[in-house]
Amino acid sequence: MSGDGKPAAGGGLRVLLVEDEPVARMAATLLLKRLGHQVEAVADGPAALSTLQAGGGCDLLLLDLGLPGLDGDEVARRVRTLPLSGPAPRILILTATAVAADLERCRSCGADGVLQKPLTPELLASALRGMAPLRETAAQDASQDASQDKAFDPSVFAVMRESLPAERVATLIAKTAATLAQYRATLEAARTAGDRTAVAAMAHKIAGVAGIYGCAALRRAAQRLEATATSEAAEAAYREMDAAFGPALSWLETMAG
C-alpha cells in the first residue's frame, strides 16, 4: 500500500484510528472494516505516536480532535515531524463541532482534512475515496443540517445489523445506554461541584456517543452544553440535554429489541 492514501491491490487502506471513547472507537472500527479497510485502533495520542515510531505504518491516521492529554491537532503536528521509515500517512481529524476555531487548528497542524461527527457510512466512504479537503467541510455541514430536526436516526444501525449477529448488536446498544447513563452521572457530579471544564468535557463525550448511535436530539443538546458550559447559557443548555436523555435511553432500549 502506498502512503498517499491510495488503496493497494487488496483494495483497502491501513488505518490507524485514535479515539478515546470506547463506544465511539468500536463503532468507527466497525464502519471502517465494513468499508474494506484494515484498522488498528488506539485510545490516545501517545499510543498512536508509539505505534508509528515502532514501525506500524499506515496509509491514513484518523484522529479525534478532543483527545485527553494530547489533543488530536498536537498529535498530527508531532506525526509530521517523526522520522518515519516509510511515506508519511494522510491525516483526517474528527470533530463534533467543526466550528471555525476547530478548522483553523486542523489547518495549522498539517492535517489533510476534517470530518464532523457523527460518522456515517456514506460520509466515511466519501472521505476515504477523495480525502475531503478542509474547504469541503462547509458543504458537508450543510448536508448534515438538512436532518437537524430529527430526534432519532435508526439508519445508523444498518451497518451493524449487516455485519454482526442480532445478539451482538443488542449487546452493543445496551453498553451504549449504560455508558451514556454513566457519563450523565459524572456530568451531574461536575455540575454540582461547579467544575465547568469537566461539564464541557463530559458533554463532549455524551455528544459523541449519542451521535454515533442515532440519538440526534441528545447529541445536539450535548453539543450546545459543551459550547456554553462556561457561559450564562449553560443552564438552559443543561435543561435541554437533561430533557433529551430519557427519550434517548428509551429509544435505545427499543432498538436493542
Image: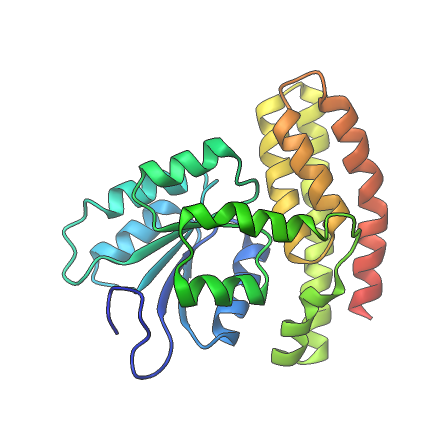
Left/right placement of residue 4 relative to residue 234 reads: left
Residue at horizontal 37 percent and vertical 80 percent from the top: 11
Compared across the picture, whether 62 is left or right of 119 comes to: left
Q: Which residue occupies the foreground of this view, 60 or 172?
A: 60
The answer to whether residue 64 is above or below residue 203 is below
For the N terminus, the quadrant is: bottom left
Point out residue 91 in the picture as x, y percentages from the top left corner: 34, 53
The vertical placement of 256 against 175, above or below, is below
Residue at image coords 49%, 74%: 35
Q: Residue at 42% of width from left, 68% of height from top? A: 129
Residue 57 image offset from top left, x and y in percent: 25, 64
Q: Residue at x 62, y 53 (%)?
A: 143
Image quadrant where residue 222 sits? top right
- Indicate the quadrant where residue 77 lies: top left
Residue 220 falls in image quadrant: top right
Q: Position of residue 98 (x, y in %)?
A: 52, 40
Q: The C terminus lies in which quarter of the figure?
A: bottom right
Question: Of all residues shown, which one is farthest toward the bottom?
Answer: 9
Q: Which of 137/90 is in front?
A: 137
Q: Can residue 70 be seen by looking at this rendering?
A: no
Q: Report the number of discs.
A: 0
The answer, for residue 98, to whether it is visible in the render is yes
In the orientation shown, which residue stands out farthest toward the top? 232
165 is higher (above) or lower (below) than 129: below
Q: Is residue 70 left or right of residue 64?
A: left
**Measured from the top left, where is residue 120 in percent x and y?**
59, 62
